[in-house]
Image: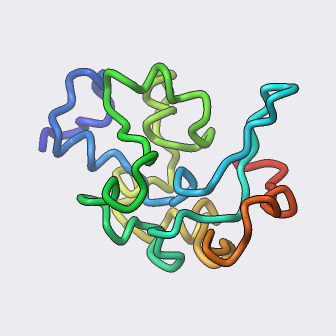
Amino acid sequence: MRPDFWKKPLKTLNKAEWEALCDGCGKCCLNKLEYEDTGELVFTRVACRLLDGETCRCTQYDIRHQFVPECVTLKPASIADIAYWMPKTCAYRLRFEGKPLENWHYLVSGSYETVHEAGQSVRGWTVPEFEIPEEDWDDYTIEDLS
């Protein structure tokens, strides 16, 4: 990969660079609720069935659509349509908005653990979706997911 590739425009990244931009926080794997009456989008502590709550990574990333067909495939061409529901700290969203990566991002810090050390991952506080009926997800909403 090119040096400092993450500072370049998203549309110029190759596939490996694009994938490497993920900070491993796991926040995008949280189930979200969108309220029809207000259009408000809120995150819940209810995690996708494929999320490993310790590593904050998808356990079946390459074949995830076989298990979760509605899982979004984030691409440079689709980021403009998807960025609004990505967490505010998401590297893809930050770069789409022309902002730098957070200091705890592994590409800046040099360690994959800093996202967890900074309290920016979902490690240890999610509940698996198969344990919570969807009609109860309202009880698991998150006020501020920064």
Residue shown at 27% from the left, 49% from the top: 20
Q: Taking 83 as reference, is 19 left or right?
A: left
Q: How is the image coloured?
A: rainbow
Residue shown at 45% from the left, 45% from the top: 70
Residue shown at 32% from the left, 32% from the top: 75
Location of residue 121 (image quadrant): bottom right
From this view, report whether residue 134 is shown above or below residue 43.
below
Q: Position of residue 63 (x, y in %)?
A: 26, 60
Q: Taking 33 as reference, is 7 left or right?
A: left
In this view, the residue in front, 75 or 139, is 139
In this view, the residue in front, 141 or 131, is 131
Q: Position of residue 35 (x, y in %)?
A: 81, 35
Q: Position of residue 116 (x, y in %)?
A: 55, 69
Quadrant where the N terminus is found in the figure: top left
Residue shown at 43% from the left, 60% from the top: 24
Q: Taking 14 as reference, is 74 left or right?
A: right
Q: Taking 2 as reference, is 51 left or right?
A: right
From this view, report whether residue 77 is shown above or below residue 66.
above
Location of residue 37 (image quadrant): top right
Labels in figure, total: 0
Q: Position of residue 104 (x, y in %)?
A: 50, 56
In this view, the residue in front, 66 or 91, is 66
In this view, the residue in front, 69 or 93, is 69
